[in-house]
Image (spheres, rainbow, N blue to C red):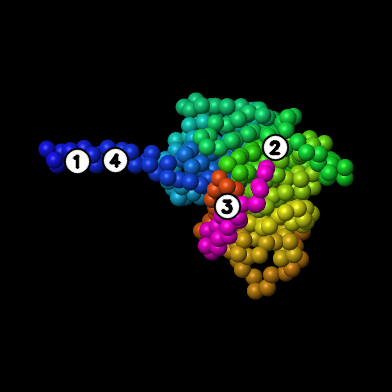
Amino acid sequence: MRLSIAFLLSLCLAGALPTVQAQTRKTLDIYVMDVEGGNATLFVAPSGESVLIDTGNGGPAAARDASRIMAAVKDAGLTQIDNLITTHWHGDHFGGMAEFAGRIPIQKFIDHGPNVQPNAIADAFLQTTYPELYGKAKHMVAKPGDKLPVTGLDWRLVSSAGEVITESLPGAGKPNPYCADFKPKDKNDDGGVENTMSVGSVVTFGKFRVAHLGDLTWNKEFNMMCPVNRIGTFDLWVVSHHGQPMSNSDVLVHAIQPRVAILNNGTRKGGQPSAMKIIYSAPGLEDLWQLHFSLLSGQEYTAPGMFIANTIDDQQDTMPVAPMPAPQPGPGVPPPPAHNGTAYWVKVSAQMDGSFTVTNARNGFTKTYRARPGQNN
């Protein structure tokens, strides 16, 4: 009888183990993953609930990117994705979804609604594959001002379908001094209208705040940030639009005053000097971390190597200081070089007091940012 009781007790403890593990997780963990200039960012709350923003590239790269995301999922100890936000219908943001969804259950799919920039691949996906995926789960069309229920987090959706929030978030709403010098860009200089539709998120965990706005464009940033800053200031900002100058205006970057920024760029995508100048001059910025060394930045505008997760495969004997001119768009442009070795992420672990640690998986370099005295977001 004693053996039976002990055996039953061990079964009960084993069954309770996942709950115990979820309760002992104390940090909000964020993985910014390398999908070669696309986007895939995984949030894991202390409760164990998860939000994945975007699924990387499609086509021949779909299996590669799905495997890279799954590596982070495994590292986080997840057996499902509770929420998948697709910021917009560009291939570098949704292309890997079908491949990824075949590897792990997804409970809820969130997007801005129909594609507004005609594209044969995106349109076919939305007509057939996507309904099949969310038909087995839940589906939500995001609206600015919506809250995403994630235990332990205050998750606000601040942009979607070309609209932005009209009411300031708690603690925000101060006049934005950078609005006075804002110069709008031509609407054809935003990289495609789907970028303007991006689902943007603001996440609060205790005193820690992070912003992820997808590829929200320069002019849409003005709509959200002027005449008042409706979203406040941040500890962490996942840099918009891979660090391209069609986004990342002063009215956003300088007003939100991020302590740390993470650039989800590619070897030859994002990091152009005009954008980097704005990012580096943001008031209060302590460090910029990058997923890739950027040939478009060169040494002139890049972060120190310890802050860069992935380098270039073909190392040169000498690296010029001057940045490489951005390739002109068009069918004759050769594809950007892909990182063919192990892909490394940048991981953030945040505490409720506002302190957080950032780790470069390539070299193990870790830096901790203490909570600011009297931190008030």
Residue 254 shows in the view: yes
Q: How many marks?
A: 4
Q: Which amino acid type corresponds to the residue marked 2 in the rendered image? A: Gly
As drawn, 226 above or below 348: above
State how far apart marks 3 and 4 are (Cα).
32 Å
Name which of mark 4 and mark 1 comes first in the sequence.
Answer: 1
**Residue 57 belongs to magenta span:** no
Foreground residue among 331 and 354: 354
Q: Quadrant of the C terminus?
A: top right
Which residue matches tag 2? 171
Residue pictured at 83% horizontal, 44% vertical: 177
Q: Quadrant of the N terminus?
A: top left
For label 1, count other residues whose C-alpha is less than 10 Å away and answer few (under 14), some (14-19) or many (20+).
few
Instruction: Between label 4 and label 2, give the one nearer the viewer.
Output: 2
**Residue 359 belongs to magenta span:** yes
As drawn, 12 above or below 276: above
For label 2, count other residues whose C-alpha is less than 10 Å away and answer few (under 14), some (14-19) or many (20+).
few
Q: Is residue 333 left or right of residue 77?
A: right
State how far apart marks 4 and 2 are (Cα).
43 Å
State how far apart marks 3 and 2 are (Cα).
21 Å
Which residue matches tag 1? 7
State how far apart marks 2 and 1 are (Cα).
53 Å
State how far apart marks 3 and 1 are (Cα).
41 Å
Q: Which amino acid type corresponds to the residue marked 3 in the rendered image? A: Phe
Which residue matches tag 4? 13
As drawn, 296 above or below 31: below
Element class at badge 2: loop
Q: Which amino acid type corresponds to the residue marked 1 in the rendered image? A: Phe
Name which of mark 4 and mark 2 comes first in the sequence.
Answer: 4
> In the displayed image of the protein, which residue is found farthest to the left?
1
Which residue matches tag 3? 356
Element class at badge 3: strand
